Amino acid sequence: MFEKYCKTQQRWAKGLSSSRHWVLVLGALGLCQNAMAQAVQEVVITGNPLGRAQGPSTAASLSGLELSQSGQGSLGETLNSLPGVSSTYFGPNASRPIVRGLDGDRIRVLSNSGASLDVSALSYDHAVPLDVLSVERIEVLRGPASLQYGGSAVGGVVNVIDNRIPRTPFQGVLGKAQAQSGSGNGERSVGALLETGSGRWVLHVDAFDRKTDDVKVPQNLACSKPGSPVLAMRICNSDSTSKGGAVGGSLFFDQGFLGLAVNEYKSNYGTVAEDEVTIDMYSKRVALEGQWKPLSGLWQSVQAQASQTRYQHTEFDAGAPGTVFANQGHDFRLQGRHRSWAGWEGAWGWQSEAGHFSAAGDEAFAPYSRTQTQALFVLEELFFDKARWSWGLRREQVKVRSFGNPDPSVDRFETGDRKFTPPSFALGARFELSPQWLWTVNAAHTQRAPKDYELFANGPHIATAAWERGDSALGLEKSGSVDLGLEWQVGANKAALTAFQSRFSNFIGLLGTGLVDQESGLPIQNYQGVRARFSGFEASGQVRLMQSAGSLDLGLKADLVRAVNQSLNEPLPRISPLRMGANLRYAQGPLTAHLGLDAYAAQNRVPVGSMVTAAYTLWHGGLGYRQKMELGSLNWFVRVDNLSNQWAYSASSILTSTAPGKAPLPGRSVKFGVVANF
């Protein structure tokens, strides 16, 4: 019956995500997870070079209509509803995902499994240069398969997937167009893509445009931005504009393909921490990808990826240009998947990456630098009866060089070179205990080379409200982690629970010193290594309450992270508290409806200098309708967020402590949209 229902859903909701929300019933606690769309136990994750199905303990994804309906203006807020994933939330325009309490350069953001060069991990106010209007799928990957992407993926991988380089041949024309508007931020956005193919070649073109006003909140906030009211129920300086597009194409031959794509992204947005500071961003990426599938021999397939990225953004203060941040570099990745040998299947590869960073201006807190990485990696899997074993290994060589600053008035930076050779390895296993029960276990030892700013920073950083200092003597960041998962499914009912712990013998954190820089008046914070422990759990699933002409599903979700600085015996900052959610979803024919809530506990576990956040609950709901057309379909939707107009602050946002009162979470908002497929 469940399979029949899924097939019905797929017919009228083509492209809807096939997985992410599972329900977990935790005995008397009755904790379950939100199932906003059809839920299945596994999804095939592109970031795994073996193309294996992954369970919720190691993977999650957003795609299709679900991505269109839940997508926000930033990557972090788009993924914030997934179990185990929170957001850095620097207002509505800039946020990166936090996975199991880890953020920044411990979360690797990829573009189609290739490097995505920007400076979003350098500062919380720097946005990731992408828009979900141009994205087909977003994956979150953990476990042995994420190890191939290096020490910067110790917390996980976020892989943003589009079809700008087509990988499957077809004949004919297909396309997609989307338009939406929102009341909470005055959003007006459109996006479209068109593809045409002859069987031997496929061409792709897409474009998007998004505009938003200052975001509405439940109470008045002060604002000194010219042209804005002094007091208004809006977050001051939270408006934005962004646009971009791409052209690409692939040639297909009997044993593979070769494709090329060029994409551009432009954005201008307010940083919210300061009323008159805006960021004007530009990114251009050229990507080349190819695959060859030999008919015989050791290799089943050989794949190569290369990209060249040019990124720059300028920070304006009251319209005057200030600090300019830039990052230019390239990435090359070659991997081969070998044929089965003694039951083992695997992928071996080599990666080369180089980036040239610069920051010029009064707020250049990091020097000009160059980072080069060479790495070899292996991922192997063995099937044995009802078990699957996997292991991964990566060996890197990282060179970081500081050039100081060419401006003679900026002589505070240390110059020099550092070289690192961090090794990492991971083991994983999944056991089918019965047709209904699945058990998973993953363990990893990961080492990460310090980033250029962790080694050589020395300057004012307004986003953190501190004078940041690096330490050129820092060693490798080292951690060991383990997670255990249990999954259950009977028909449409399913449950999953994952418990995890990560221990760092040298966790590189930005910690206060108690000193103040005399010139700027900012508190001095140093990058230094401490012992740290992260532990917690994630629970998710679905329960079918009714099945007749339509279906009614109930879900609840829960996750929790506890992070401790063991060197100082105090909590680490910016950790999301216990979160629980509930959702009812009804589906009948072309109609869907859902109503749910996300409850956040108070976060009292904060270090000295951080703000405690109160508990709050955010209600959400929505309607969807699929209208069949002669050449395709129209998918209409309306979504309401923060239905009760709750006043709340994010515990994982640095603004809650550094700019108290400036950036609460958005108030009630209603989004209308339509997605056309043809």
Image (cartoon, helix red, strand yellow):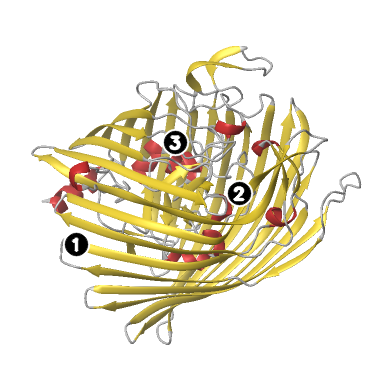
Q: Which mark is residue 603?
A: 3
Q: Nearer the viewer, residue 412 or 676?
A: 412
Q: Is residue 198 above or below residue 78?
A: below
Which mark is nearer the camera, 3 or 2?
3
Q: Which residue is mark 2?
A: 121
Mark-to-mark CA distance, 1 and 3: 34 Å
Mark-to-mark CA distance, 3 and 2: 24 Å
Q: Which mark is residue 549?
A: none
**Whether residue 85 is visible:** yes
Q: Which mark is residue 437?
A: 1
Tell whether label 3 touches label 1 (CB within 8 Å). Answer: no
Quadrant for the C terminus, please: top left
The residue shown at (43%, 48%) is 562
Q: Quadrant of residue 82?
A: top left
Residue type indicated by callout 3:
Gln
Q: Nearer the viewer, residue 448 or 21?
A: 448
Q: Secondary structure at mark 2?
A: loop
Q: Is residue 645 above or below residue 153?
A: above
Q: Position of residue 202 (x, y in %)?
A: 46, 58
Q: Is residue 133 above or below residue 92?
A: below
The residue shown at (32%, 55%) is 498
Q: Position of residue 41 (x, y in %)?
A: 25, 56
The residue shown at (20%, 49%) is 6
